[in-house]
Image: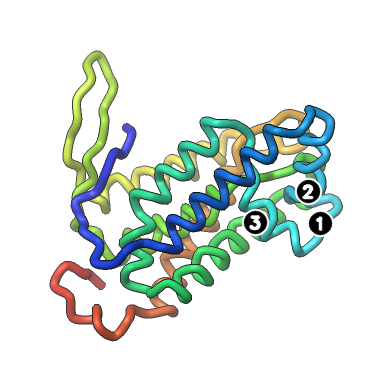
Amino acid sequence: MIPLRDSQPSYNTPAVTILLIVTNVFVFLYQISLDPYSANELIFRYGIIPSRFQPVDLLTSMFLHGGWMHLIGNMWFLWIYGDNVEDVLGRGKYLIFYLACGIAAGLTHLLLNPDSRVPTIGASGAIAGVMGAYLVKFPHARIVTLVIFFFITTVDIPAAFILIYWFFLQILSGAVTVGQADIGQGGVAWFAHVGGFIAGVILIRIFGTRAPYRHRPDLHW
């Protein structure tokens, strides 16, 4: 299932979401402009490596990606869910919220893989937090989803269903890869996604909603 768009309108230009997407794209274009050795060095310097952790890596790792599909997938999810979360939080709080979710995701990975020597990069943890916030605020929105089985079609799926399904898929995927962080190969930090999502669910309640939007009929609590 691939989400294509949501039914929830946003009432303001999602400037921070656009800025985050543009920043990630420009950083990735810089990455691929480097020779292979320098690109690898960049990832090892600014990604999260638990065995030699530096706090700043929690921020820098969010803006690095491992390939075009990694980047496009992350930015697509951010575009679908981010505009509405930015709408209800406001631009300043949304940026802080996004970074806080990314940090929470990175810390989750650190706690579960303290001795790993494999760098972890990507905006997935922060975007998972945005998805968690979307679940809290817009559970009844509809997500137009591309379904590929023996046929190809689009289906309107409730946001609550697709987001909860995605969340448990991360848990199951993480469970079958426990203990594989140090095999020297790349992979997906599934539990970082879980940590980011949970942080989003919690932090959206702490951050609250902008005063002009507290009584909007399309918001759910």
Q: Residue furthest top?
A: 150
State the residue position of label 3.
106
Q: CA distance from mark 3 to mark 1?
A: 11 Å
State the residue position of label 2.
49
Q: Name the amino acid type tagged 3.
A: Gly
Is 77 situated above or below 59?
above
Q: Label 2 neighbourhood size at 10 Å, few (<14), some (14-19), many (20+)?
A: many
Q: Label 3 neighbourhood size at 10 Å, few (<14), some (14-19), many (20+)?
A: many
Numbered mark located on residue 154 in the image: none
Q: Name the amino acid type tagged 2.
A: Ile
Callout 1 secondary element: loop
State the residue position of label 1.
53
Q: Label 1 neighbourhood size at 10 Å, few (<14), some (14-19), many (20+)?
A: some
| Residue 221 in the figure: left or right of residue 113 | left
Q: Are the residues flagged by discs 2 and 1 in contact, CB closer than 8 Å? A: yes
Percent x, y for residue 73? Answer: 46, 38
Callout 3 secondary element: helix
Q: Quadrant of the C terminus?
A: bottom left
Name the residue at 34% across, 44% down: 165
Q: Name the amino acid type tagged 1.
A: Phe
Name the residue at 56% across, 40% down: 175
**Residue closer to the observer: 13 or 186:** 13
Percent x, y for residue 109? Answer: 66, 52
Name the residue at 35% across, 64% down: 85
Callout 2 secondary element: loop
Q: Quadrant of the N terminus?
A: top left
Percent x, y for residue 82? Answer: 38, 57
